Image (cartoon, rainbow, N blue to C red):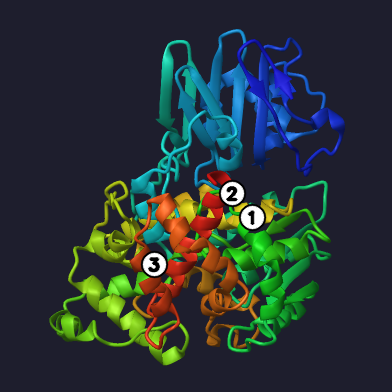
Amino acid sequence: MYSGESAKLGHCRLSIIDLSEKANQPMSAEDGRYTLVFNGEIYNYKELRDELRERSHTFKTHSDTEVLLRGLIAYGAEFIERLNGFFAFAFYDQEAGELLLARDRFGIKPLFYARESDQITFASSLTAVIKGISRKEIDSKSLFQYLQFSYVPAPNTILKGVKKLEPAHYLKMSKSGVEKKRYYTLTETVQTERDKAGMQQRFRQLLEKSVQDRLQADVPVGTFLSGGLDSAVITHIAAKTNPDITAFSVGFPDKPFFDESERAAAMAKHIGINHRVLQLTESDIDRKLGGILDAIDEPFADSSAALVNLISEYARNDVKVILSGDGADEILGGYNKHRALLRSIETSFANKAMQSADNLISYLPESRNSKTMNELRKLKRYSRGLNLPLADRYLEWASFTPADVVSKILRNPENRIPAKLHIDPADFNTVLKADVEMVLPNDMLCKVDLMSMHHSLEVRVPFLDHHLVNFLFEIPASEKLNKSKGKILLRDAYSDAMPKNFFKGKKRGFEAPLTHWLSGPLKKYREELFSEERIEKQQIFNFAEVKHLERKSTSQNPGDSPHTIWALLVFQHWYMKHFD
């Protein structure tokens, strides 16, 4: 703990590089003027340390924390642009009375803050900030977005007056006021004249350098290995540098349709590495649900977080650091919605027919509980989206609960559309950029960091090295995906490294059994949290609409209502902890 004239800084360290006590935080300069608290890793810290030594800086540790401290002393906020890594940090200058907060380019690490008069409270978790503020009040506009998207997009949080520092931004607080500045922006300059072989070579060089950088650690490092391409490529590259690396997978013995552990095992055998599988049954997950809900720092309803939590707990028995394939879908066009958006832009007979028949299609039953019903669900979403402008269509397909349903749930609905998205139908890179700026930090990266750090496991994401991301946004989207296939560049670049027939299999992913959870292990809990007495006391939700959605969630035509009920339950659990 550091306590100065006008600031207090605290830190709980997960030691990864330089495990000595000298590298502990808060870390202060010799004269006590400057102090740093830092969450994350700087991968180019050795090169930066050499440069600083040439400027007569001396070092007492081998840590990246000390490099960051001395770099900020030497260069100020400009030093942030030279960092290659993921981070959230606070740098305090006691003499000048200045505080600098910063967050990495893509939002891999979280940073919450709240200003009250001339005081600022900040932390890596919302729970910690709540303990330091005088007033808690639900932000109704953020609640609307949470129910719609399953998360609250930055810079807002579920609480009024508490903010998330946006990715690629820093905030400087001094006696003269507060300044917030963006220090990095994705390129929008596309170079159309590209040699395909040269493009693949450059892609491999950047990705493999990124993986090597992220293997730096003074503790054991492993990988998450699913049945998909992204994690397979990362594991393949990592094993070339570290043949003793261990890969961790999840198996679902009572859900064979979703179980890809055999596919992952075949990949591990092909690479020739150690492989461990966590075999999860529904009863295993059921027993852990209470603890998983407790790990949620701000209402967050991506139900696959449960699996990230459990595989993180399993891997933490052997390693402290994991490499994952997160980020590849956003930057390389790997989602179904990407291909759907490409098809929707076309002027085709099928699109025109579905636009005309939207009212009729809306009466079709829908569910995620069977393959046929799920296809009908997708058809209805596609048809509904065709009648919207492209930016609104993107938001519709990025949502889990339609805005009109959210309006019925809330007593006083205040719909806030996220910052206006720039989506150009002639440049599909703008769609991928929207994912990188909205979905990636607020959903995917939030989920991984929240659940892995709950078990003191650090997850590193090689696909989000900014040099690699810059390169991928300098090439046309057509080199990355088309209407029938995503991640083309990744597939072509590493086709020779994959087992025979690897690309023939379709990655299925795992859908959390929400209906089972809500009607089984969480039934009594749900009844308590959704009781008429509690909901009327809160004055937030319409009790009749909540009960209607509960009934629908167990019907033969549930649509996405199980997800909406899950989102409400997550919120109620969080609200009970912090408000009741």
Foreground: disc 2 or disc 1: 2
Which amino acid is tagged 1? Asp
426 displayed left or right of 517: left
- Image disc number at residue 236: none
Give the percent coordinates (x, y) of residue 150: 44, 60
Give the percent coordinates (x, y) of residue 491: 52, 74
The quadrant of the rendering that contains the N terminus is top right
Residue position marked by numbered label 2 in the rendering? 577
Which amino acid is tagged 2? Lys
Is residue 358 something one can see in this rendering? yes
Residue position marked by numbered label 1 in the rendering? 294
Q: Name above or below for residue 289 compared with residue 267.
A: above
Is residue 461 something one can see in this rendering? no
Foreground: disc 1 or disc 3: 3
Which SS class for mark 2? helix
Q: Residue at horizontal 63%, vertical 68%?
A: 307
Marks 1 and 3, Cα distance to the nearest angstrom? 23 Å
Q: Residue at horizontal 58%, vertical 66%?
A: 525
- Pointers 2 and 1 in contact (C-beta within 8 Å): yes
Which SS class for mark 1? helix
In primary-sequence order, the first of circles 3 and 2 is: 3
Residue position marked by numbered label 3 in the rendering? 546
Q: Residue at horizontal 59%, vertical 49%?
A: 577
**Residue 88 occupies quadrant:** top right
Q: Residues within 10 Å of mark 3 (few under 14, many from 20)?
A: many
Q: Given the current orientation, which residue lies at the most extreme bottom position? A: 372
Viewer-nearest residue: 513 or 231:
513
Which amino acid is tagged 3? Val
Give the percent coordinates (x, y) of residue 74: 61, 18
Give the percent coordinates (x, y) of residue 287: 71, 71
Q: Residues within 10 Å of mark 1 (few under 14, many from 20)?
A: few
Which SS class for mark 3? helix
